[in-house]
Image (cartoon, grey):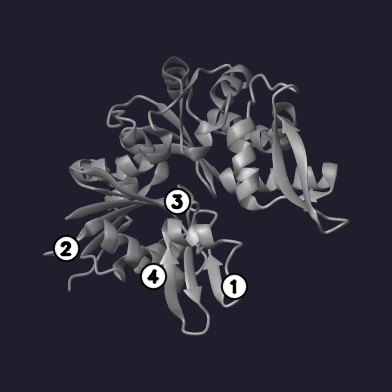
Amino acid sequence: MDIGIDLGTANIIITRRRKGVVLNEPSVIAFDRRTERVVAVGTEAYRMEGRSPSYIAVVHPLQDGVISDDILTQALMRELIDVAAGVRVMKPRIVICVPSLITDVEKRAILDAAMSTGSRKVHLIQEPLAALLGAGISINKPVGHMVVDIGGGTTDIAVVSMNGIVTARSLKIAGNRFDQSIIRYVQNKYQVLLGENSAEKAKKNLCNLYNPSDDIIAPVKGRNISRGLPDQVDLSEAEISEALEDDINTIIETIRRVLEETPPELVGDICQSGILLTGGGALLGGLEQYLTRMLGVPCRTARDPLTCVARGTERAFRHRDMLLDGFERIDAYTQSR
C-alpha cells in the first residue's frame, strides 16, 4: 500500500496509489485536557473551534508548514491514515511533501511523526516538485518550469528543471496570513474583531485582486471592540483587496527575485510556458490576472489547485528512480520492523 500525504498547515490531503485523493480534512485536532484523550480530528474538530468548553482544546499542530506539536501531529496523522487506509494487510509506504527550504530538524520531526503511524518506509518530496507532478508536467527534461504554491502556512516559489530545483524561495505568507490581514484591517478601520472563520469566508466571497469594485459588498459579523457586543460591517471587494495588498506584493517581489536568480535560458522557457499557480491560495479571485499584469509573464492556475500537490505525491511513486533531488538521495528514511 502506497500513501501520499500533503501535510499542510490548513488541510491534510491523503492519496492512495491508483485511487487518487481519498481524504481531505482540516489539520485540526481536539483533545480533552482532563483525560488527555483525542476527542475529534479533521472536520469534526474544526467545527468545535471557538465553540468548545475550556477543557476541550482545539489545536492546529502544524504552523507555517512545519510541526509545532509533535505528539498531537502524530495523533492526528495516525487517526487520518487509519481512515484513509482502511484495513491494512501490510505496513504502507508513505510520501510526504514538505516546503522547499525546510530545515533538517523540521524534516526529522515530520519523518518521526510519519514513522509513528506504523509505516514501513517514509520519503519526503519538496512541494514544488510534487505540484508540477500533480499538474501533469514532465520535469525530467532540460526545460525550466516555475511554480508558485500558495498553501495555508507557506508560499513556495521555485524553478524546476531535470527533476531538480534550480532556484527556490519560501515565504511564511499564505492563506492564514491573508486571514489575519483581513482581521487586522477590519479591526483598525471599523473597531470590529472578526473570527478566523469569518475572515476566511470574506476572503473567499469578496476577493477580486484584478478589478475590485466598491459596489460589491457583503456583511461580516464580529464583536465590537469598544462595546463588547455583536456587530456587523459591510465589506467591499476593494476593501478586501486593500487588506491583502501588502501580502500579495511581497509574494510578487519574491517571484521577481527568484526569476533574477534563475539562469537566462530557463527564464526564456518560463516566459514561453508561463508560471503555474497551485495551492488553495491560487483560488483567490483575480490572482492569476493580477500576477500576469504585474510580472509581464503569463500565469495559469492548475486544475483543482487545492489537491494538486497531493496528486503529485501519488505520482512520485512512479518517478522515484528519477527524482533523485529532493526525493531519494537525502530525504529517504527507512526503518524495517
The reply to whether residue 208 is in sight is yes
Identify the residue at image location x=30%, y=68%.
115
Q: How many marks?
A: 4
Q: Hey, what amino acid is under mark 4?
A: Ala
Q: Position of residue 19 (x, y in %)?
A: 20, 43
Cα distance in 3D space between marks 1 and 4 = 21 Å
Q: Give the answer, above or below, for where 164 lies relative to 37.
A: above
Classify the position of the C terminus by image quarter.
bottom left
Depth check, mark 3 against mark 2: the one in front is: 2
* Left or right relative to 166: residue 290: right
Residue of label 3 = 11
Q: Can residue 111 be spotted in the picture?
A: no
In the displayed structure image, the side of residue 275 where residue 233 appears, left or right: right
What residue type is disc 2 on?
Val
Q: Which residue is mark 1?
A: 53
Q: Label 4: which residue?
A: 75
The kind of secondary structure element at disc 1 is loop
Q: Whole-Å distance between the Cαs marked 1 and 2?
A: 34 Å
The amino acid on which the numbered mark 3 sits, given as a three-letter code, is Asn
Residue at the far front in the pictured view: 230
